[in-house]
Every structure is written in C-alpha cells, then in structure tokens.
C-alpha cells in the first residue's frame, strides 16, 4: 500500500464512517444470537436486581455490578421479567437447553437480547476508545481501532456467543492506559476490577505486583507503590474468596461457596505438560521474573508482560472459542506501532475460526447460537459432523485436521509473541541510544 | 377424559385417506392409550406428576403418509406463564421409542389462553418421513408418544387428538387456516441428511422465514432497531455526501 492510499484510507472521514459501520454491525447482530449462557447470566443478574444483592461470593463481582447498572436502567423496557428469567432451580449455574429454547421462543426475545448485550457494547466501545488513546491517536492507532472493531473473534464473543468478556478486557485496557499516564493507583484499582471480572485476569495481579516492585517503578513514591500492591492484594483475596462478603458458606443462589481451585476451573491450565514440566506455570513464572527484574520503561514492560501472560495461557491450555477475545486487544496495540502485525493478526483470526469450527467445543461454535432467530438452526449438523460425512475424511481424519488447525493457530500466537519481544527489545535499544 | 381420547384413538383404525371425523368413533379400546406419570383430574385435565410425564398412543399401524399431520385440540387449565416444550417420539412396529426418532414443538403462552386447535406437520420432519430419496423411513408407525415439559407442572384437557394424511396436511399448510395453530416440529438432523439439498434448502428457508415472523412479533422493538440502524446509515451517507460536495 503506498503512502497516499494509506493516508486516504485513514482519513478522518473514513475513520468516522468505519466506526459507524462497526456500530451498525453490532446493532445488527445483537438481537439474534446467544449461547445458553446468555440466559444463565441474565437470570443471575435479574435475581440479583430483584433481591437487591450487589456483592456476591463470586469471582466476577465487577462484571455483575457493571451489568446490574445497565439492567437497572434498561430493564424497564422488558415486560414480565419474572417469566423471562425466573428458573425453577437457581442452584444450577448453567441453564438447561430446554429452558433456553423456551427463553428464545418468547415473543420479545430480540428486544431482551439487545438489552442484555448493551453493557457488552459499551465496554467494547470503551476498549476501542482506550486503545486509540493508548496508541497516541496516531494513524497506527486508527488501524488498531478498526481492527479491534471488525475482528471476528471479539464480535463472536460479545455479540454472537453473547458473553460479558468485553468487561474484563475494558478494565484491563483502562489499567494499561492509566499506567501509561503514570496513574499507578488508578491502574491498580482498574486491574483489581479486571481480576474480579473474569477468573483468568487474576494472573495479571501478580504481574502487576512484580512490575510495581521492579526498578521500573522507582519514579513513583513508595507510598503509591505500597498502596497499589495492597489494592491488588485485596482484589486477589476477593477473587480467590479468601474472605466472604456474606459471611456464610452459602451464596445468594443457595449454592455452597467454593474456591476457583476446588471448582476445577484452573485444572486445565496445568494439563499441558512436557516431561515433568507444567508449561503454563513455567512460562508464567518467567514472565513474573522478567516483570520484577527488568529495569526498562514501565509502560512498555507492563504491556509486554500482560500480553505474554495471555499468550502463554492460550498457547498452553485448552479453551473455548470466546475466551480468545481476552487476547485480541494486546496484538492490536502492537499493530498500531508495527503495521507488519496485520498478516499475523489476520491469520490468527482465520486459524481461530477454522480451529474452533473443527472442534465446535460442545455447541459453542455452531448454528445453535442462532436459535433466537429460529430453533430449527439448533438442530443442524455441525462442521465435524459434515466433515465426517464428506469424502475428505478419507484423506485427512478429523482429529488430525483439528490438531493441524490448533497447531497453526498456536503458531500465529507464537510468532506474534516473538514479534512483541523483538519490538520491545528494539524500543529499549532505541531508548538507550537516545 | 381418558375415554374421550381413547375414542378418538380408536377411530384411527378406520383411518384411510383423510382426517378422521369424530362421529366415526368406534368402541373404546383402552390398550391403545396409556399415561405415565400423568393423572387425570375430576374436570378431565391431564396433569403431569413428575418431570417425566407422557402419554402414549399405541397400535396405530398406519403408514407415515397416513399419519402425516397430528391435530390436537387443547385447553390449558391455567394459561402457560412461559413457552412450554413438548417432545414427540414415534416408533415403528417391534421397536422402542428412542432419541433417534424424536422431535419437539413449543406452545407459546399466548396460544395457551384459550382452547386452541394445534396442527403438527410430522411429515415435515426428515427423521419422521425422510425425503424423496429415502424410502427407508416410509415404513409403518406403530406408536406415538407426547412428553409433557419436564420443567413445569401443567394441566391440559385434550378435546381431540387426530391424524390427517399427506394430502390433507399439504392443503392445511397451504391454506394456513386462522383457527388452526401450526406448530412446526424441531429435529436434530444428521450430516448425511443435511448434505442433501432437498433437505437442507427447505430447512434453511423455513428457519429464515421463522426468524422474520418472530421479528414482527415485537413491532415496537423492530421499529426502534430499524430506526437506530437507519440513523447510523444516514450519518455515513451524510458524511460521504458532505465529502463529495466539498470537493
């Protein structure tokens, strides 16, 4: 692409139009798709709203509060909420498919899905804004924002699968922005909120503490550093349920309060083992060491450490299609500075799509998600079934195909992780030479 | 109530090319009809007593072409608070009911407020009748089972249960009579079936139409949603026009 074409493409007008187009795309998708988890989460939020419960013994309090805020405002446009969201057995965290089919058969289901997804839309747009600010409103920043707004991974996670993943990403991105602006305490609070929005972001807590304890933070007052460490410590304790909000062992839904570990949610993190080495913890520990030890600029180092933590998680653990949305914002930031990040980013999207198509992950990546439009779509065969029925399977069996897809998907992430480190080293070298 | 259903069922034995008229009923035959985890109230309503309540129609022994559509006239003791999912199983002679031969339909709360005639076009199910290239599924039907929703207790008076043949089903679907509520059954299709265009295309077309019909049920939201997108589109067009005329 020559410079003049690039300039035209990134003009103020085009940027403005593309943002509007991205909004139209989101509004178009919001009413018609949703996973069964949309109902599970909506009924939890409804229950909390009805019962006036704002803090629960769950590791997603910040997400719940954010959604509750929107629910309080916009649920006035939903009739018969008790019929829509009420469920016989609130102790089951996931709704039964039968209950889900009844839910999506409601005459006002499109309106309901649209309203439920409003907080995800707002968080998504805040991420775009923060990304633009973080990348200094440059041409590259515009490219990054456009990629963020049109990448299929986050669009799928927030509007088709219909999950709240944009909320923890928003807090995380705002925290990085606060670090860049040298507001350490604000950054700590935002990171704490991020950790209490989604379980995986808890890994960024120790990274944050390591960064604050590192030589890169010498410019900050010791009191600020200490306070931010305390904030992260409290956020971690809440997330791990080391202390209780309700002072009982039973939560508001009547379930036994359990820790992340006892629920088995972190189990899959340690399943990738080479010999006797647990690979994700090994990579994570190396990132912690780097964060603590390295003397370089706090802003660049925090970005790299957070990016690599997420990369390590997705490289060395099993996960579902919508989880990848936690990762996308980091390569987008690098894309703003390095235009040659475009191809790996595009390839990440392509390989993510094909990989998840090949595994479907228990109905997460199938036409089932379009059940609100028509339940008929829930009964259609998924890609692995069609693959097995086709002649291709004689040349390449499904298992090998899905492994190949996963390998290529991981290769994209690995390449990007290396490029991130290279970029960081180049920046550090340039800074030293100056 | 039970006798009434049995009477209707017995008339199935006289089933030939057309829907059975109620006045052709013969002597009751209790072994054709059974209830499981369902009790009959003094008022004649059938109420499920557990999450696995169902009624079974047996000894039908008719071809799928003859048993093409299922007509139900139902009255709910209390209107449904939310949609209810009913499963429907069928079986050939010398076979059991199985997960491979089932579908489900949903009755909405609006339709449950009054006594309503429902029509379930079973023949539209690939699993029930196959497509034109698949004669294997055209064998006899011996039994049919209707499962109550597993997640709620409901009481229904079955005013009538009858079957209609393929030609009558086609005309009913064509006419879309106002006093007959058509309940499209949903099924899980195998990949081998779906790769056939004469199966996939009607399914996809129907799904598209169903969504459009669904969309028009909430007109206020539809107008709001369209206006929202239209206003954003106008902003884009305005920006383009502004840039064009500035040049």
Image (cartoon, coloured by chain):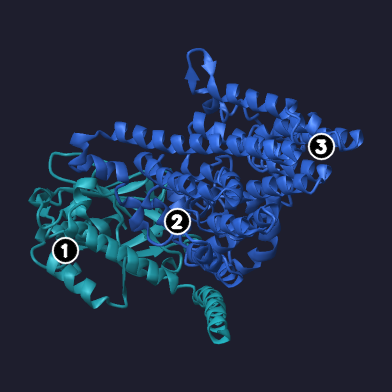
Chain colours: A blue, B cyan
Pointer 1 residue: B25
Mark 2 vs 3, N-terminal side: 2
Which is in the foreground here, disc 2 or disc 3?
Answer: 3
Residue at 37 percent of width and 39 percent of height: A359
Please state the horizontal and vertical placement of residue B70, each as a whole percent of the image. 23, 61
Please state the horizontal and vertical placement of residue B60, each as a whole percent of the image. 15, 52
Q: What is the total number of numbered labels drawn onto the structure image?
A: 3
Discs 1 and 3 lie in a common subunit: no
A123 or B206: nearer the eye? A123
Is residue A255 something one can see in this rendering? yes
- Say what secondary structure mark 2 lies in: helix
Q: Residue furthest bottom?
A: B245
Discs 2 and 3 lie in a common subunit: yes
Q: Residue furthest top?
A: A276
- Say what secondary structure mark 1 lies in: loop
Label 2, residues with CA under 10 Å away: few <14, some 14-19, many ≥20: some
Which is in the foreground here, disc 2 or disc 1?
Answer: 2
Q: Which mark is residue A102?
A: 2
The chain carrying label 1 is B
* Rendering quarter of residue A73: bottom right
A372 or B148: nearer the eye? A372
A116 or A228: nearer the eye? A228
For the residues bearing labels 2 and 1, Cβ distance under 8 angstroms: no
For the residues bearing labels 2 and 3, Cβ distance under 8 angstroms: no
Pointer 3 residue: A231
Please state the horizontal and vertical placement of residue A56, each as a whole percent of the image. 71, 41
- Say what secondary structure mark 3 lies in: helix
Q: Residue furthest front?
A: A433
Q: Which mark is residue B156?
A: none
């Amino acid at each position: 692409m020559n410079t003049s074409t690039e300039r035209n493409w990134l003009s103020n007008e085009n940027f403005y139009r593309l943002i509007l187009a991205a909004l139209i795309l989101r509004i178009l998708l919001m009413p018609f798709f949703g996973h069964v988890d949309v109902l599970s989460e909506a009924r939890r939020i409804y229950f909390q709203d009805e019962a006036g419960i704002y803090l629960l013994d769950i590791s997603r309090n910040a997400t719940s509060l954010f959604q509750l805020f929107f629910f309080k405002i916009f649920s006035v446009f939903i009739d018969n909420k008790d019929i829509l969201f009420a469920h016989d057995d609130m102790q089951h965290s996931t709704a039964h498919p039968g209950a889900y089919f009844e839910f999506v058969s409601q005459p006002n289901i499109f309106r309901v899905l649209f309203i439920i997804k409003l907080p995800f839309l707002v968080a998504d747009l805040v991420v775009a804004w923060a990304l633009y600010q973080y990348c200094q409103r440059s041409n590259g920043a515009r490219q990054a924002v456009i990629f963020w707004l049109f990448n299929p991974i986050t669009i799928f996670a927030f509007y088709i699968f219909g999950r709240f993943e944009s909320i923890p990403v928003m807090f995380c991105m705002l925290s990085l922005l606060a670090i860049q602006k040298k507001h350490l305490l604000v950054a700590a609070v935002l990171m704490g909120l991020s950790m209490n929005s989604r379980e995986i972001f808890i890994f960024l807590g120790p990274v944050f503490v390591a960064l604050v304890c590192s030589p890169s933070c010498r410019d900050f007052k010791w009191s600020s550093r200490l306070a931010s460490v305390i904030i992260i410590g409290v956020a971690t304790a809440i997330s791990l349920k080391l202390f209780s909000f309700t002072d009982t062992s039973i939560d508001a839904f009547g379930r036994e309060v359990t820790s992340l570990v006892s629920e088995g949610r972190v189990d899959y993190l340690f399943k990738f083992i080479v010999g006797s080495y647990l690979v994700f913890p090994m990579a994570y520990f190396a990132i912690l060491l780097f964060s603590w030890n390295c003397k370089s600029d706090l802003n660049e180092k925090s970005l790299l450490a957070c990016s690599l933590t997420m990369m390590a998680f997705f490289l060395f653990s099993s996960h579902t299609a919508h989880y990848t949305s936690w990762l996308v914002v980091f390569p987008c930031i690098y894309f703003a500075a390095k235009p040659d990040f475009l191809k790996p980013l595009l390839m990440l999207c392509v390989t993510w799509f094909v990989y998840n198509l090949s595994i479907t992950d228990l109905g997460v990546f199938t036409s089932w998600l379009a059940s609100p439009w028509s339940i008929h779509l829930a009964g259609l065969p998924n890609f692995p079934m069609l693959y097995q029925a086709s002649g291709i399977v004689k040349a390449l069996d499904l298992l090998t195909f899905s492994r190949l897809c996963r390998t290529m998907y991981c290769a994209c992430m690995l390449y990007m992780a290396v490029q991130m480190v290279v970029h960081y080293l180049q920046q550090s070298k340039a800074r030293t030479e100056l | 109530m039970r006798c009434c259903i049995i009477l209707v069922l017995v008339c199935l034995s006289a089933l030939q090319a057309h829907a059975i008229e109620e006045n052709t009923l013969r002597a009751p035959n209790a072994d054709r009809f059974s209830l499981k985890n369902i009790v009959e109230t003094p008022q004649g309503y059938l109420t499920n007593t557990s999450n696995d309540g169902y009624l079974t129609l047996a000894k039908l022994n008719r071809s799928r072409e003859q048993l093409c559509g299922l007509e139900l006239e139902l009255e709910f003791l209390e209107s449904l608070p939310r949609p209810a999912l009913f499963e429907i199983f069928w079986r050939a002679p010398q076979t059991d009911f199985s997960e491979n031969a089932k579908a489900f339909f949903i009755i909405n709360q609006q339709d449950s407020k009054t006594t309503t005639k429902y029509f379930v076009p079973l023949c539209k199910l690939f699993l029930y009748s196959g497509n034109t290239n698949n004669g294997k599924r055209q064998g006899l039907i011996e039994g049919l089972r209707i499962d109550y929703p597993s997640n709620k207790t409901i009481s229904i008076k079955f005013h009538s249960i009858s079957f209609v043949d393929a030609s009558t089903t086609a005309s009913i679907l064509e006419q879309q009579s106002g006093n007959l509520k058509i309940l499209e059954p949903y099924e899980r299709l195998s990949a081998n079936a779906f790769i056939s265009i004469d199966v996939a295309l009607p399914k996809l077309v129907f799904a598209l139409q169903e969504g459009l019909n669904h969309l028009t049920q909430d007109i206020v939201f539809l107008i709001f949603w369209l206006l929202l997108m239209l206003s954003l589109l106008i902003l884009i067009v305005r920006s383009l026009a502004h840039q064009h005329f500035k040049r």
